[in-house]
Structures are given as structure tokens and as C-alpha cells.
Amino acid sequence: MNRKSPAHRRTGRRAAVAAGLVLAVGLGVSTQVSAQASVPARAQASTAASQSVSGTHGQALTRVADFYGAYIDATGDYPDPDGTLAKALRKHYLTPDFAKRLAAWERRNGADGVLRAQNVPAKWTLTDNGAIGHAHEVVVTLTFGSGGTTQKTKLFVLVERYNHISDIGTTSSR
């Protein structure tokens, strides 16, 4: 292949276009490739939306989100889950009476009472379900599995007025 052959010119043109794109991106300059270039440049738009999480001190929804996020991380589906942290989170977030009832439920059912499952969810969402007497109910939807094989479990978490979880059930307290 000599310098004047069509293949050599295309390779040189591709290299020049690529170098120009790298330089333009590196300098933050918008670049357009002319219609005469043999390799069309494709702009790849990001499909990832920016995410944000917010909360308010003392808000039941934030309290339950904090608990479930930390608890799922502590009991995570990896070789070395942190059982000590999971116990500490239960002690901090659950009322003592509910912690006893939850332990009894776990012995009877052979599952984690906070998650109502034997494994850890891949994702979770929370929704405020409003006040119930002097307490507040938060709906926690846990999604287990991935891809086309997912299963959702909906839990109703009751938070007492002092921001401790006093019940987790599969039906609403309403």
C-alpha cells in the first residue's frame, strides 16, 4: 500500500478525524465532522438520568428509607455480610416490643422479618402512606431478582411518633 492508494488515504483520514474528535472533546469544544469525511461521527447521548435523594430530619419516610438502605447494605448478598451492623440497626430503629415480636416471627418462618424473605432485594422503593392515629405508615416495595425474573413484595411499615418502627406487615394498618 503506497501513500497515494485509496486505502491509505482512508486510514489517514480516519486517524485525522479521530484525533480531531479527541482534541475537541479534550478542549470542551463542539465539533462537527464534515460530510466529506469517510467515517461518520456519531454523538452518543447519555441515557442515565441524574439522581438525587433527599430527606427531612424527623420525617417517617426518611427514617424508614435510612433504615432499609443501611439494613440491606449490612445484610447484603455478598460473602461477608455485617451481622453486627444489622443487629445494631434493628436496635436503633425498632421499638423493643416490635424487635421481640419480629424475632418470634423469624423463628416461626425461617426468614428475615425486616425483608420478609430469605434473600436480599435488588432494589427498593418507598412511598408515604400517611398518618394513622399517632403513627405514620410507609409502604416499602422490595424487588427481588433481576431482568425478566423479578418478584415484588410490598411491606407496610408503621413508625410511631418517636420515629421508631413499631410494626412491619404485609397489609396496611388502615
Image (tube, helix red, strand yellow):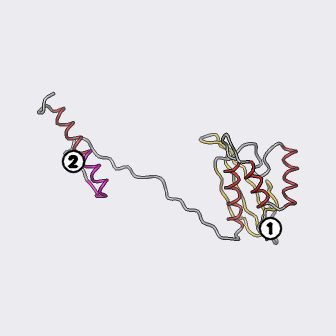
Residue 160, numbered label: 1
From which residue to which does the magenta span run?
18-31
Q: Nearer the viewer, residue 83 or 95?
A: 83
Q: Which residue is mark 2?
A: 35
Q: Quadrant of the N terminus?
A: top left
Judge from the rendering whether residue 166 lies leftward or rightward of residue 1; answer left or right: right
CA–CA distance between discs 2 and 1? 66 Å
From the viewer's perspective, is residue 148 above or below residue 173? Answer: above
Q: Nearer the viewer, residue 19 or 126?
A: 19
Q: Position of residue 142 (x, y in %)?
A: 69, 51
At label 1, the amino acid type is Glu
Q: Position of residue 124 (x, y in %)?
A: 66, 53
Q: Residue at x 85, y 51 (%)?
A: 103
Marks 2 and 1: which is nearer the front?
1
Judge from the rendering whether residue 28 lies leftward or rightward of residue 52; answer left or right: left
Q: Residue at x 25, y 41 (%)?
A: 39
At label 2, the amino acid type is Ala
Mark 1 neighbour class, 10 Å CA radius: few under 14, some 14 to 19, many 20 or more:
many
